[in-house]
Amino acid sequence: MRLQTRFAIAFVPILFAATAGTVWQASKAVHKIVIEEAAGRANGRLEELAAESVAGFEGRSESLLLPGMTAALVRENALYVIAIDPAGEILAHTNVTKKGGRYRDPLGVTVPTARPSYHEIQREGQPVLELSWPVNGKAGAAHDQAEELLLLNASADGALQNLGQLRMGIPLQRALQTERRIARELALLLLVTCGLLLGAVFLLLRGILLPVQRLVGAAEEIGLGRYGHTVPVPSATELGNLARSFNRMSVALTQTTVSKDFLDNILTHMIEPLIVLEPDGRIRMVNQAALQVLGRPADTFLGQPLDNVWPECQSALQQAQFDGSVQDREMKWVAPGGTAIPLLFSASVFRNKEDYLAGLIVVFKDMRERKKIEGEMVQSAKLSAVGKLASGVAHEINNPLGVILGFAESLLWDLKPEDPMHAPLRSIEREAVRCKNLVQALLTFSRVSKVEPEPLAINSAVEEALSLVQAQARVGNVRVVREFAPELPAVRGNRGQIQQIVINLANNALDAMHEQGTLTIGTRLLQEAMRSWVVLSVTDTGEGIPEEIVTRIFEPFFTTKPVGQGTGLGLGLVHEIVEKHGGTIEVESRPGFTQFRVKLPA
Amino acid sequence: LHGAGAVLAPADRGAPSIQVSMMPAPSATFTALKQLQPALRRIAVLSASPGYDGYIRDLRKEAQSAGIALLVQKVDGKDALPDALRRLEGKADALWVPSDPLLINEKNLVLLSQFSQSSRVPIYSPVAGLTNRGATATLSVSYKEIGRLAADTAQQVLAGHRMPSDVYATTIDLAISAETASKIGLQIPPDVHDGTLQVQP
């Protein structure tokens, strides 16, 4: 329960009880003052009246008593005035019908007192202050009931005897109304004062408790490992000193202890994908790199057993728990969309100070780039080997082939077409020419390594190459579209080889479009990781490359064309040229769209 | 003289004089009192000065007509009021106090007020202002009305008409003390209120 609530529960009733008590006491005091004031004034009048009424009492004469009594009644606005003898008989009464009766004291005292007194009574339902004042005369002057008189005082002339008493009734209704009004006003004043006091106390409490609440909040933050949390220092009071000490402690903790925030930040932002598991295998934390590779939001992992969301890692986790760690397991993660991502999985357990299992740390690597590089390296090695082989073979074959072709052509000159040897010799010539073309291609392939780079404007080089394929495009009813970016920076390369790239890619595209379609040749500038590239793209609207062969298209002698129509060296040559120029080539293909993108360093 | 406002004396001293009374006409008085206190059956009249005998005689005559028993209580001397009041206790439904200087003084007003409240007997009087001193209601005649009545009477005499020896005003100023009425338990009918009553004789 909050301190303010406790204070309210404890203090408010006390405050109100004290207020009620004060009002009650004050009312009593006011009542006493009102009564005493009224009694004091009326007693003065009664004393005067008593002095004037001695003869009336002595003579028991109503006519002597009434004038003074009625005058006193008018002056004091009294309800009644009564003259009573010591035996209780009414000698005179302002209500004349009461004369001669026995006075009955409202408090039950039949014989009235001989001393001045007053008391509150009720007469006909109204509050009345009844005052009594004794009337004394000289001894012996009273009538024959003198022996009943009370000896009160003595003087030099003789003893004074009580002749009776005067009673006066003062209405208290107005006085009590005034008293009640004072009490109401007082109660209101006290309530307002209490309300203000309460408000001031609550404000004061709030002023005290706010820094305390801030300290509690900051302590909770530190309890959660978020060191360095500080609070405002309110003033130079004890609370201010406490806040200052707390801040010093918090800063000291930051400098001496590794905070949870700090660790969280490291783990969250580390480049390597990482997953932290609870001892029971539920996922406690997944960093950003892991989420990026896995392709799902964090809330689909947190709290889930890892082997539920990634069943393939179950055995690896078991082994890690058994052996303490497991390293470099190749696994696959099926990302949303169905793509299988190759991953290299490692896991190790970690323990607390008591050597109990505290959890598991899983790290993995995305192997896609590595796999790609490995493939490219294999391809490159293949091409290099083919290149060396082609160069040797070409030189060895080229000379005998020249002899075969020369003799075949010479014999054909001499033979008539009707000659039975003419047709075989023509076949020899044709196949020899084909072999010569193949050898020429091999020689070209082998000579790629000898790049002599020069700065060249790629748009003009591409334009020249396109002039060579323009005629073929027209025959095939293919529209050629140029999308050249202006003012491209120069690339360093061999003009002929760059044009060879364009011709080979364009020829393949024209073959793929089967006599109609659009061939788009484009160039553009690409800024990538502080490097500039010029991208040459060749796009066709042909049938596309089947997915199963897309990884093999750059292999030497791989072709889908009929025998005799392709050497299988075109794309291999392109790949070789690009690589020797320090560039990359990539292909994107689907039915109706195939695009080769060649990136050359600018 | 019962509070004579004017005495019309002819040149011939042997001729009877005509007294214009300051009292309201007895018939009008009883009519007004019946309106104030419909249950009024017995009324006591305090009599101290001999000058009011004629007026009391006229009252008695009109009381019979109004069906009200009239009890005349003599107050002999300045200290006789207490005894007179004690004699009246339980014998009257109301008390009529004329504007007799022997009755109307400070002490007697207190005694009358106390008697009225203790006996629950209303006090009526022709003296204006007594409602502040314990009377339940006053039925007074204004000096203006007396003057007007004297002038009318003089005109009648000069015209040769015969006039009674006492003439009374029939226009009465009625004042009621609701507080006193409430104290003695008298229910004033709601249609009766302070103001000028024009009562036909």
Image (spheres, grey):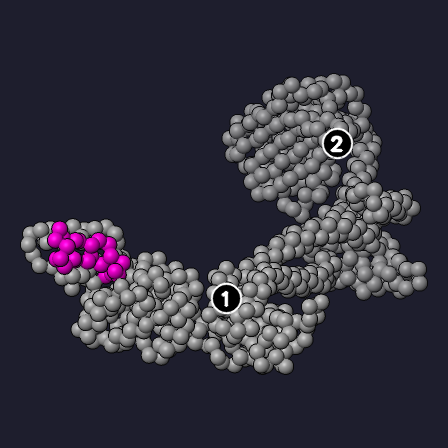
Measured as percent of width and height from the top left, residue A91 is found at 51, 75
Measured as percent of width and height from the top left, residue A31 is found at 61, 63
Question: Which residue bears the numbered disc 2?
Answer: A529
The mark that comes first in sequence, 2 or 1, is 1
| Residue type (three-letter) at the residue carrying disc 1 | Met
Which quadrant would residue A224 be assigned to in this image?
bottom right
Question: Which residue bears the numbered disc 1?
Answer: A69
B11 with respect to B41 (left or right)? left
As helix, strand or loop, the secondary structure at mark 1 comes to helix
Cα gap from disc 2 to disc 1, whole angstroms: 122 Å
- Pointer 2 and pointer 1 on the same chain: yes
Q: Nearer the viewer, residue A13 or B158?
A: B158
Q: Which residues are magenta?
A: B1-24
Residue A436 lies, with reference to residue B200, above or below; the image says above
Which quadrant would residue B109 be assigned to in this image?
bottom left
| Residue type (three-letter) at the residue carrying disc 2 | Ala
The question of residue B3 being in magenta is answered with yes
